[in-house]
Image: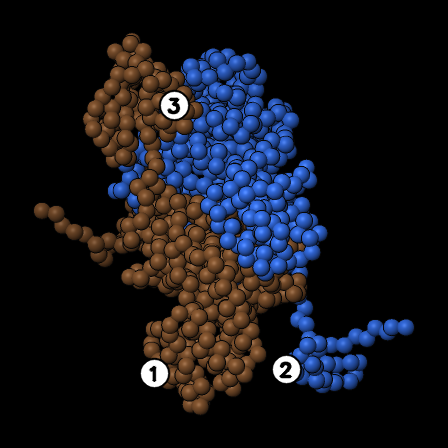
Chain colours: A blue, B brown
Amino acid sequence: MKKEIKLQVIAVNFPFIKISLGRDVLELFIFASSIQIMAQKPSIPKGTRDFSPLEVQRRQYIMNIIKRHFELYGFMPIETPSFENSDTLMGKYGEEGDRLIFKILNSGEYLKKADANLLETGKENQLTSQISEKALRYDLTVPFARYVVQNQNDITFPFKRFQMQNVWRADRPQKGRFREFTQCDADVVGSDSLLQEVELIQLYDAVFTDLKLTGCTIKINNRKVLAGIAEVMDAEDKLIDFTVALDKLDKIGKDKVQEEMRSKGIDQEAIDVLDPVFSLSGSYADKIASMKDLLKESQIGLQGIEELEFINSFIDDTALKSAVLDLDITLARGLNYYTGCIFEVAAPDGVEMGSIGGGGRYDDLTGIFGLKNVSGVGISFGLDRIYLVIEQLGLFPDSVRAGVEVLFINFGVTEARYCAGLLSRFRESGIKTELYPDSAKMKKQMSYADRNEIPYVILAGEDEIASGKLNLKNMRTGEQSLLTVQEVIERLR
Amino acid sequence: MKKEIKLQVIAVNFPFIKISLGRDVLELFIFASSIQIMAQKPSIPKGTRDFSPLEVQRRQYIMNIIKRHFELYGFMPIETPSFENSDTLMGKYGEEGDRLIFKILNSGEYLKKADANLLETGKENQLTSQISEKALRYDLTVPFARYVVQNQNDITFPFKRFQMQNVWRADRPQKGRFREFTQCDADVVGSDSLLQEVELIQLYDAVFTDLKLTGCTIKINNRKVLAGIAEVMDAEDKLIDFTVALDKLDKIGKDKVQEEMRSKGIDQEAIDVLDPVFSLSGSYADKIASMKDLLKESQIGLQGIEELEFINSFIDDTALKSAVLDLDITLARGLNYYTGCIFEVAAPDGVEMGSIGGGGRYDDLTGIFGLKNVSGVGISFGLDRIYLVIEQLGLFPDSVRAGVEVLFINFGVTEARYCAGLLSRFRESGIKTELYPDSAKMKKQMSYADRNEIPYVILAGEDEIASGKLNLKNMRTGEQSLLTVQEVIERLR
């Protein structure tokens, strides 16, 4: 019968260790080999992910398609550092955004600069700026604005850039929301032409069509229309409250939206003015007609409507391949910097997922960094959500998983030496080739090929080497063929 | 004549502002429109970089070549999160490494968990673990070890993975050393076959040859040989001091190395034993012969020599394309986890740059995370330094800069509408195509094409549209041709 003994380690000074056992204290001499430091059970921070080979390949499949279309549309790649000076990022995403930015602790004696009072009173907000000067990128747009201002003398405007990099947010993780995720952005700055909006809508359509993600809805709205509605409601001072409430229409319904507006101090008369917006339906053109009527007294509202009309006339001419452009007057999008058209892409019907892309026009993003009067417009692809949608719909092509094509079986040093000489020839012919590293049992080597889904193995034992040929085995059919090296290379290529 | 007045702002409470002017204090009412908050002069943290389109394209050119060879050699991609739990990283890179790891401040009320005493006494080291639980990746090897242990049940061993991601170090920036840089690693775990070392040497050679970086030296040594030397010197307890000193031989010379050894308490008799190492010369085989003699009494030393001999016999058989394999007994490499062969790649002669790659065998890297007896070996490519070397030698192909191929000139809305319909056709044919967004002056549009090095522009004005043709202008020669759409597409493709 085993008895459990509770003991406590008091001190460790190898090879001696002092323990207390009940009321006794014992000093023990430990053989080095019997000590094993408790291994950590490894894990990763919540909201982050490891990507397996298949996942990396699938992500690259998506990114390559997005990148190819970015380039076809004339965008050029840039990259910015993962962390920026805190003052570049802070205050650009609202109070909530500031909270969600990951801050990096200063190196070395970071407390030296800290105000002792703040430490004592536990005021994190004020202390943070004293012990942290850098922060992880929160999106790609603000760093891009910073880039444009900093490099304005080297840039030819209009400047069309794309950027595919990770961003980090200390958000509560949930389905399709991670603390590290990848954004793929395309923006144009230095042109206020609405043709940019047209091109970006076509770009969305081209990418999603190529990804076989047909039936996406590209929702469009215009901040000027929202401002116009606020104007005719005589509630300009409540613009944000009103758009936040309106944005929830498809989630909570008309009654609850009206209730929220009332609770924010918007009076019933104003809400009644809004009534046509709640019952808006029909085609893009129908909605435009209704809105024109509603906004007839608002100059800014009509300007927004005109922009939406112009864009739609171009899209009509050059029909979209598989996506649908839908005017959604309730679309608001959170970020403060948008001033004109705004976009959001919804996955095909039947897939529950937040927006898989979004963007819009901002008239003065670079102003915060000192470069005024530069209009910009851009869109973003949410790689991680697009991945989940494609996975859910089973739309990843089988060809995406492209591993080793042929494995040389290892029969021993002599044979391996012979094979090693051939490996380069195979690889120079573009064939992904491996030699099993040990002369392990045949069964083990074959099982390695199986598990890694390697379609062919080559058996080059004593006999084959003598005959100057290779035995090529098709792992799917089991068929074996005795071929010259050149014949094998040609068959595999 | 203007007079400069010095005033001092005492308090700001918009729209009122209190200033002192000489001995007077004035309270002013400020019109909102006259206030302009001073724009930040944007900058990026030291040791980090923005990458322009050309730089991104050049980096991708290098990465694509590395990636292609990784795949040809049978490695599969994985990716790990940018930040890990601190305890995954801390203590793995020595004390210096711990200091250089970027720590991420906890979100929210991070001071709540902090010990008030530590705050008062300013003890950063102990406080850090209380206010920071995550840290940025310092290299790719430790996260890889963590990945292997965490996913050991899903992995088929030997597991060959590659990983191309950024790492971050709070190091003092200097030429070729950045605080954020990209590593490209290939490792095999679960096989102690020396064929892996052979393959990795060939992989280095294949990549650098493909990058036209001929004449690189792949230095090789073996930690067992270093242990053997320490043994025959009777200085096993001074192994680290002795290798650190020896590693500096080509920088500071024999005398200074000996001096450093003496200062570390290694006696003259032991240093004399080392003499053949200082005068080692000749071919790989010559050096092996000398070392065999020196290490004849050391079992571990001879084992190391045997490994180096075996590897060289394979490399002899399958000659390297352009690199040279050189046995460098002074090579030590800092990281503690290496136990067998170690590698380091030096740029071609005449280029001053630290090593552009390195790696080695580690017998128990995953042990720290609880998975024992898994041998691994890997190499790393230092992308940023390779970039600098290729740039210095002028070896980037011109084709790397691949921007827009054709620009449609914008003559106005009607013409733009006509062109917009053609853009998709061009893009579907794989031609990178742009329409100038505004009907700006011809000169401005042409200058845009020039500055962006766009080789062709298309002029489709009223006449061309009427004739159903396009006017294609070659920007280099100035030649213009009136062609059908299909003819233009064929010429550009």
Viewer-proximal residue, A435 or B58? A435
Q: What chain letter is assigned to the residue under label 1?
A: B
The amino acid at mark 2 is Asn
Element at badge 3?
helix
Whichever of callouts 1 and 3 sits on the residue coming sooner in the sequence is 1
Q: Position of residue B107 (x, y in %)?
A: 55, 54
The amino acid at mark 1 is Asp
Residue A47 shown left or right of residue A430 in the figure: right
Please name the residue shown 21% across and 56% down the image. Answer: B22
Q: Which residue was labeled with disc 2? A: A13
Q: What chain letter is assigned to the residue under label 2?
A: A
Residue B5 shown left or right of residue B311 in the figure: left
Q: Position of residue A76 (x, y in %)?
A: 37, 37
Q: Which residue was labeled with disc 1? A: B255
Residue sticking out furthest to the front? A467
Note whether residue A243 is visible.
Answer: no
Viewer-proximal residue, B32 or B200? B200
Please name the residue shown 69% across and 53% down the image. Answer: A442
Element at badge 1?
helix
Q: Are marks 1 and 2 on the same chain?
A: no
Q: Position of residue B216 (x, y in %)?
A: 37, 59
Please name the residue shown 62% across and 54% down the image. Answer: A462
Counting other residues with Cα less than 10 Å from the Cα at mark 3, is it few (<14), some (14-19), or many (20 or more)? many
Q: Is residue A365 above or below residue B13?
A: above
Residue sticking out furthest to the right? A1
Q: CA distance from mark 2 to mark 3?
A: 74 Å
